[in-house]
């Protein structure tokens, strides 16, 4: 059972039917802020800001949303053609091979939903600015959090689309079309906004679950600074380290004892999650990762009330990078025989082999081809929507961001200490394997990059030994598999546009940015397409 504060957020995220079914809560939750007869107090703050988080459930796990955008453009997850379909006019093949179009749904959905968050924040800020929403003593906190969530929406656009309009006001009398800003201008705006509001936000880790508090903003700043070399050509590793140090020193978060605790269906109790997107199988639907990855025959394995669709799976080359004793391999991926708990009958056996993406080459992957995403623990009798919240920022990420920044600034030993700390829970049965050295982290990747032939064999001439700090990239893969991290990491490590994996060959570096959606350009003549499209 999730706490009342989480249900406040979930209710605002949900549809009208979901909200109406929550009437037993003490607080009355609205889908928008209504100024009439509303005198808010501190306890009303979640209700006021909740609408700004509304699109995040859709942006993260929605159909062809942010999760797909980050993972299917990278080297860990694919959606091959299956006996029951999944060609879908070639969209998954285009995402894998980096041949997406300016009308591809995955990048367009992230654009639309990020701007939905921004618009909701601007709407409430405009009400406050106009005096139609009087907030009294909580006004600074409300404004700060609204600006933080708006900046989060712009962070998503900064990372994925780059050159987007910066819109901070809602003015019904202004009929002009928004002007486009450069990626550098968006970067400067997001950093400025987050730094200006960070000290106005709550430091309480518990009462702000599912919202951006002070530590969530610092973690987001750390991530932006870590990637600033990509965004604006200027590395900001020292700033990243400082933000991480502040979070560590706060002692508000710690690594969960069990890796799976971060991702299970009661992960609102995790001590590691800094900022999560809350989901609920009744009141906050939308996390359907289990439906997309499991084969239909797995329905009886979990006694599910809905039948899975049998789509995406792990890239075999990535699975082959794991140490067999790394518990994250089994904690992250469903593999081997899957049995009906009542009868003991083996329903399907997932194998680490996928013949190809399918489509034009005529290849259809068997139903059991590829390990399936099991990181978000599936409970027995699961419905079509999971209770698992999506951990967007967590303490393990903070430790690894600091470690990478140390590694890149010459302190490989300090980086190794942090990586070892993160690895320890994954090697309880062989603690010696948890320890890595600075020399280890300066090695290349163990990923055998290369094109896979239809018979499953891979050419390894491309390899991974030449990737600077490639072993650290491997560590990121093992720790953050299926957490919508991988595209960003591959770009930062110079792999995204240089390496082959599965059926993917390198494309132009301009593919590190997604296109401005063609429909948006048609509506706004101020928008110019990103280079390479």
Image (cartoon, rainbow, N blue to C red):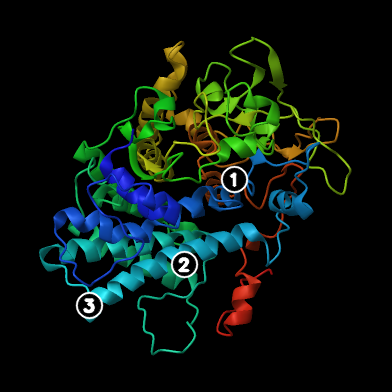
- The residue beneath circle 3 is 132
Choose mark 1 or mark 3, whichever is in front. 3
Which residue occupies the foreground of this view, 133 or 248? 133
Which residue occupies the foreground of this view, 403 or 205? 205
Q: Residue furthest left?
A: 137
Q: Position of residue 461 (x, y in %)?
A: 76, 37
**Can you tell which quarter of the image residue 135 is in?**
bottom left
Q: Earlier in the sequence, mark 2 or mark 1?
A: 1
In the rendered image, the quadrant that contains the C terminus is bottom right
- The residue beneath circle 2 is 115
Picture residue at 30% right of the left edge, 70% below the top: 124
Q: Position of residue 302 (x, y in %)?
A: 57, 23
Choose mark 2 or mark 3, whichever is in front. 3
Vertical relation: 411 (above or below) 125: above
Image mark for residue 71: 1
Real-space Cα separation, disc 2 to disc 3, in angstroms: 23 Å
Vertical relation: 99 (above or below) 382: below
Q: Check if mark 2's residue and mark 1's residue have beta carbons within 8 Å.
A: no
Real-space Cα separation, disc 2 to disc 1, in angstroms: 21 Å
Q: Position of residue 352 (x, y in %)?
A: 71, 25
């Amino acid at each position: 059972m999730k706490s009342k504060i989480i249900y406040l957020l979930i209710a605002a995220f949900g549809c009208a039917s979901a909200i109406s079914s929550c009437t037993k809560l003490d607080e009355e939750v609205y889908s928008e802020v209504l100024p009439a007869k509303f005198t808010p107090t501190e306890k009303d703050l979640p209700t006021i800001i909740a609408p700004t988080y509304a699109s995040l459930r859709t942006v993260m796990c929605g159909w062809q949303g942010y999760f797909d955008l980050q993972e299917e453009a990278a080297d860990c997850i694919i959606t091959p053609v299956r006996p029951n379909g999944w060609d879908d006019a070639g969209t998954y093949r285009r995402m894998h091979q980096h041949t997406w179009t300016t009308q591809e749904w995955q990048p367009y959905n992230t654009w639309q939903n990020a701007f939905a968050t921004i618009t909701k924040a601007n709407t409430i800020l405009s009400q406050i600015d106009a005096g139609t929403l009087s907030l009294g003593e909580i006004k600074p906190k409300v404004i700060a959090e609204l600006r933080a969530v708006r900046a989060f929406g712009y962070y998503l656009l900064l990372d994925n689309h780059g050159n987007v309009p910066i819109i901070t006001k809602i003015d019904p009398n202004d009929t002009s079309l928004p002007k486009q800003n450069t990626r550098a201008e968006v970067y400067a705006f997001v950093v400025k906004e987050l730094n200006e509001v960070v000290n106005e936000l709550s430091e309480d880790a518990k009462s702000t679950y599912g919202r951006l508090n002070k530590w969530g903003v610092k973690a987001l700043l750390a991530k932006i600074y870590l990637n600033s070399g990509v965004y604006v050509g200027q590395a900001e590793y020292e700033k990243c380290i400082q933000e991480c140090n502040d979070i560590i020193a706060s002692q508000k978060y710690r690594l969960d004892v069990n890796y799976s605790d971060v991702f299970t269906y009661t992960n609102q109790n995790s001590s590691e999650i800094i900022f999560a997107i809350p989901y609920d199988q009744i009141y906050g639907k939308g996390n359907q990762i289990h439906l997309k990855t499991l084969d239909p025959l797995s329905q009886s394995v979990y006694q599910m009330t809905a039948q899975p669709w049998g789509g995406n799976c792990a890239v075999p080359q990535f699975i082959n990078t794991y140490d067999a004793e790394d518990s994250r391999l089994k904690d992250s991926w469903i593999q081997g025989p899957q049995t009906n708990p009542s009868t003991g009958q083996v329903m399907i056996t997932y194998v680490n082999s996928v013949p190809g993406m399918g489509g034009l080459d005529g290849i259809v992957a068997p139903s059991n081809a590829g390990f399936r995403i099991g990181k978000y623990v599936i409970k027995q009798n699961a419905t079509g929507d999971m209770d698992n919240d999506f951990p967007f920022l967590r303490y393990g990420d903070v430790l690894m961001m600091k470690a990478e920044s140390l590694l890149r600034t010459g302190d490989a030993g300090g980086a190794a200490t942090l990586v070892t700390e993160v690895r320890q829970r994954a090697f309880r049965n062989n603690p010696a394997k948890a320890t890595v050295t600075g020399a280890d982290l300066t090695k290349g990747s163990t990923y055998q990059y290369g094109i896979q032939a239809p018979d499953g064999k891979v050419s390894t001439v491309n390899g991974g030994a030449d990737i600077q700090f490639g072993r650290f990239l491997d560590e990121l893969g093992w720790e953050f598999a299926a957490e919508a991290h991988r595209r960003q990491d591959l770009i930062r490590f110079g792999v995204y546009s240089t390496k082959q994996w599965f059926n993917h060959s390198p494309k132009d570096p301009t593919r590190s940015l997604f296109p401005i959606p063609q429909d948006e350009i048609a509506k706004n003549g101020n928008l110019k397409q990103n280079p390479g499209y």
